[in-house]
Image (cartoon, helix red, strand yellow):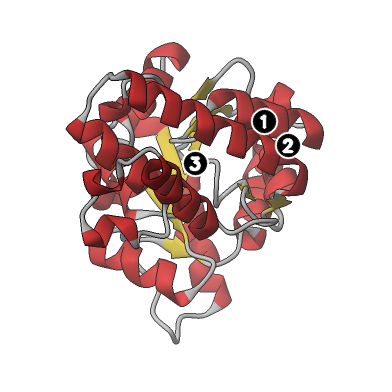
Amino acid sequence: MTSDSTQSDATPTESAADETERLRDVVAPIRFVLFDFDGPICRLFAGRPAADVARDLVQWLKERGLRGLLTAEEKQQPDPYVVLRAVHRRHPRSDLVVELERWLTRQELNAVTTAMPTAYVDPLIRTWSAVGARLAVTTNNAPCAVGRYLERRGILECFAPHIYGRTQDLSRLKPDPDCVERALRALGADPRATLMIGDAPSDYAAARQAGVRFLGYARNDRKARLLREAGAGHLVDSLERLSRVVYAIGDMKAP
């Protein structure tokens, strides 16, 4: 079963009760939850926009006489992971890529101190964990940065040791399903009982390839449009209702 076969999109006139019921249908069979990190859990670069980090990556290459590695479009990308993938495609597993990846990891670690938690996500994570779901992080970010952030928020125990992030093989970044598949294997998870929450088309693509259900978190119209264009069926613009639905389902299951 693929993710899009279990989803439907709410209409603008749909009532809150109808949307709650749709979320209940998505969540009820779920026993494993995979969170993307930057977006659903926090805004990692809240203190410094990701676009600035991407520009610094381009500048880093320029200072080494390597700016020509990128196309004009890639140089304008606001996403540092697009730049990283582009360099890796042209020089896979090279010392250049290793150095570039380490530079980006340092930026992510520095960003942890100013990262902003996504509204309602901490109680959602704690509730889902408390009602017995097994949680993992599946992300293109460095696992060490994810772990440091979760520890600062006091929610690392809800995930540890299941943090599956960027490896030295950058060809396996999402939309490749590698991090999702690693999580499924480690958790012993049935993909049909697994939900991934992500905010980007690459998250949806990875989830679909791995055969897990998908819920898109779209904090603005641009995110929603990109997810819908990618094929994501069910979206939420806030995690508040989802948190209440998870709590209600857990309460119903309690003895």
Q: How many marks?
A: 3
Residue shown at 49% from the left, 59% from the top:
51
Mark 2, other Cα within 10 Å: few <14 / some 14–19 / many ≥20: some
Q: CA distance from mark 3 to mark 1?
A: 16 Å
The residue wearing badge 1 is 129
The foreground one among 229 and 75 is 75
Q: CA distance from mark 2 to mark 1?
A: 5 Å
The foreground one among 156 and 98 is 98
Q: Amino acid at mark 3?
A: Asp
Upstream in the sequence, badge 2 or badge 3? 3
Residue 126: assigned label: 2
Circle 2/circle 1 CB separation < 8 Å: yes
Residue 245: image location, x then y, percent: 62, 53
- Which quadrant: the C terminus? top right
Q: CA distance from mark 2 to mark 3?
A: 16 Å
The residue wearing badge 3 is 36
Residue shown at 55% from the left, 25% from the top:
143
